[in-house]
Image (cartoon, helix red, strand yellow):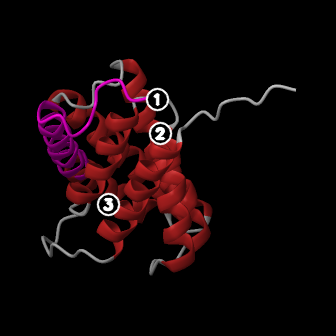
Amino acid sequence: MEMRKPYFTLYQTAILSLCGALVFVAKTFVNLSLHLPGHSYLLVAVPFVFGCGVVRKAGAGAYIGLISGLLASFFGFEAYHIFDILKFLAMGVTIDIVGVAFSHRMDHPVVGFIAGGAGSIVKMSVNYAVHLLLGVPATFILLGIGISSVTHLIFGGIGGVIGALVLARLMRAGVIGTNET
């Protein structure tokens, strides 16, 4: 019987796991105090875009989202622990879709902006869906979704650009190879 090769190599699994842990740390322990909704995604989108850009395989964002969601669920400080897995997983899957649509060119700032912004918007939408599911009145959610969606898009997009620029710089320096397998 022939052994199948794993989808992610050990190197890729380590990178993705570290990026998932960085997402958890950025969301939980780093406080920018900008008093705007979605401002934390300035830092949260960076590991997502970076990890997906290093690995360049479909499923990388979902893996990062799963790891960060599990960490947030077990150790997080938000009220809806188990739903953190779903929220971060949705963000990762969205960034995966953007990565596949743009041939995994996460080192380009425009792709980074689209990936970070879209991931942040989807995570915000899943968060509001969870609140609706748990009985928060829809009027409160509709009032908060307008400005919140714009700031999530902006901060997530800027975080994606930062991740893309860091990734591109490391690729140019030769620290990260472009055809890692």
Instruction: State the residue lying farthest toward the right.
Output: 1
Instruction: Give the extent of the magenta segment.
Output: 152-181
Residue type, label 2: Ala
- Res. 60 mark: 2
- Res. 57 mark: 1
Foreground residue, 95 or 5?
5
Vertical placement of residue 71 versus 47, above or below: below
Q: In terms of secondary structure, where does tag 1 sit?
A: loop
State which quarter of the image contains the N terminus: top right
Residue type, label 1: Lys
Q: Are marks 1 and 3 in contact (CB under 8 Å)?
A: no
Foreground residue, 84 or 35?
84
Q: In terms of secondary structure, where does tag 3 sit?
A: helix
Where does the image place residue 21, in percent across and percent down from the top left?
41, 63
Q: Is residue 166 magenta?
A: yes
| CA distance for labels 2 and 1 | 6 Å
Q: Is residue 7 left or right of residue 106?
A: right
Chain-order first, disc 1 or disc 3: 1
